[in-house]
Amino acid sequence: MNSYSETEYEIFSRSFILREFSEENIRKLSNLNVGIVGIGGIGCPLSEYLIRSGIKQLTLIDGDVVEKSNLNRQILFDYNNLGEKKVKVAKTKLELINPETNINIIDANLDNDNLSTLSNCTIIVDATDDWKVSRLLNQYCLHNSINFMFSSVVKNDLQIIIFDNSIKNKHLCLNCIFPNIDDVELPRCESVGISGISAGMAGLISAQKIINFFFYLRDET
């Protein structure tokens, strides 16, 4: 079981005195392991605010490098990081918030070969804007009873939904809502644009939804 050090209690003191952060919920928080696939406009603020909220274990998956076009919304990166691997920069910056976090990084795009790196996650977040990856994650989470969050932004429009996969075959899944097998011709960020503020809001809302899910809707982690 994970626990917090005296230093961590000082870092999170203003949160932990809130009524919602009961002793039981603090225990739940310390045991969460969140997998984030895609360290972009949503994944950056999501990972940062999860760490700042007291979550100690993250798995970050992304094979991309930082580009200039990322800088308006991917808040973990700056001009000095151009050309560097996103997951490596993210890990370094997140550990500056809480050096006692355990951040596992996979410098690759998600596929069938590296899906198993997410097997220990309590919840997996799809922040990729890639329907092939979304379907792959949805099926993996269903088959392994891992909770799943789908989070996306195009222009100023947000879509965020969390799926409780704790009970097999008795719940709604992403494929139930979007049953198309192939990726449909939908607007993408590179063609119609994306608001950096909207991406940030999606990351913040996703972080809060994860905490709410385990604090209020689940009896166990």
Image (cartoon, rainbow, N blue to C red):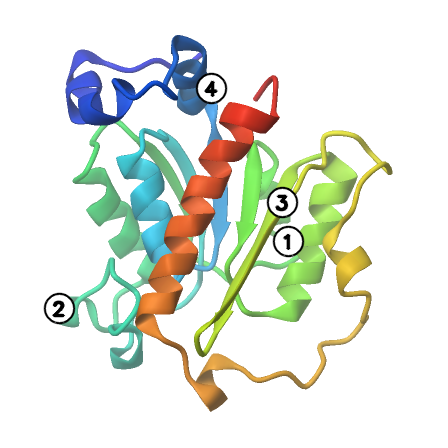
- Mark 3 lies on residue: 148
Which of the marked residues, 1 or 4, is nearer the chain's N terminus?
4
- Mark 4 lies on residue: 28
As measured in the structure, the alpha-carbon distance from the residue carrying label 1 to the one carrying label 4 is 30 Å
Quadrant position of the N terminus in the picture: top left
Instruction: Work out which residue is located at the far bottom of the displayed protein and give it.
Output: 191
> Which is in the foreground here, disc 4 or disc 2?
4
Q: Which mark is residue 113?
A: 1
- Mark 2 lies on residue: 80
Q: Determine the secondary structure under disc 1.
A: loop
Tell me the kind of residue under disc 4: Lys
As measured in the structure, the alpha-carbon distance from the residue carrying label 1 to the one carrying label 2 is 32 Å
Tell me the kind of residue under disc 2: Asn
The picture places residue 100, in percent across and down from the top left corner, at 25, 26
Q: Residue at x 26, y 26 (%)?
A: 15
Tell me the kind of residue under disc 1: Asp
Name the one closer to the observer, 79 or 186: 186
Which of the marked residues, 4 or 2, is nearer the chain's N terminus?
4
As measured in the structure, the alpha-carbon distance from the residue carrying label 4 to the one carrying label 3 is 17 Å
Tell me the kind of residue under disc 3: Phe
